[in-house]
Amino acid sequence: MGLRDFIICAVLFPLLLICAYTDVRFGKVRNVVTIPGMILGLAINTGFGGWSGLGFAAAGLGLAFGVFLLLSLLLGRVMGAGDAKLLMAVGSLVGPKLLVWSMVYGAVVGGMVAVGTALAKGRLKKEIVGLLTSIAGRLTGVAKLDYSESDSLRLPYAIPLGLGALIALAMHGGVTGI
């Protein structure tokens, strides 16, 4: 692990831990944590890689924003803005390639947590039917999908997103790029 990876991990680990805590405790991922994470990601990568480092960090940040925007347009409010800003901070720190892996692993972990929670609460069938009905309604234009007004289960998604980032770092040998 080089100095750049060490510094990025020194920023990323507390960022993920604090966001997971505030999401569980208060149901919010705070801007006071995510925005400095984005800025530090841009600054660290620029400091180590110059203009290409800035491009690397901006590509990760932009990709996270694009994924959030695409999900919002296609499926409605399935991800909170705090979770999106957390992904943007992660993207600015680790770049686009590792961000994609972070999202993949985070989705797998989040899916397992969602299914486990729904099973434990005896709501798996209800949640699956509600999700499929809402997506079909949104894709056909019949109904808008807005989970903020539904009785569907709410999960602190900063935990799966954070675990996804940590798994991606471990599985792919640290931060790559620049």
Image (cartoon, rainbow, N blue to C red):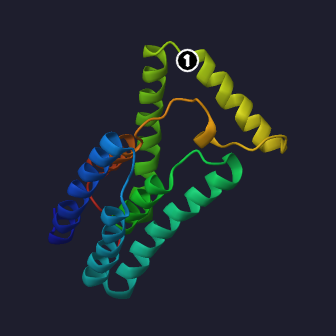
Label 1 neighbour load within 10 Å: few <14, some 14-19, many 20+: some
User: Where does the C terminus fall, quadrant-wise?
Assistant: bottom left
Q: Where is residue 158 in the image (x, y as percent from the top left)?
A: 37, 46
Q: Image quadrant of residue 73?
A: bottom right
Taking the image as shown, residue 17 lies to the left or right of residue 164, namely: left
* Rendered view: 2 above or below 154: below
Residue 171 appears anywhere in the view: no
Q: Which amino acid does label 1 sit on?
A: Leu
What residue is at 46 percent from the left and 45 percent from the top? 104
Foreground of the two, 17 or 101: 17
Residue 144 appears anywhere in the view: yes
User: Where does the N terminus fall, quadrant-wise?
Assistant: bottom left
Q: Position of residue 18 (x, y in %)?
A: 25, 52
What residue is at 17 percent from the left and 62 percent from the top? 10
Q: Name the residue under label 1.
A: 124
Image label count: 1
Q: Position of residue 174 (x, y in %)?
A: 26, 57
What residue is at 53 percent from the left and 48 percent from the top? 79
Foreground of the two, 25 or 120: 25
- Secondary structure at badge 1 equals helix
Q: Image quadrant of residue 57?
A: bottom left
* Rendered view: 84 above or below 112: below
What residue is at 44 percent from the left and 52 percent from the top? 83
Taking the image as shown, residue 146 lies to the left or right of residue 91, namely: right
Taking the image as shown, residue 169 lies to the left or right of residue 103, namely: left
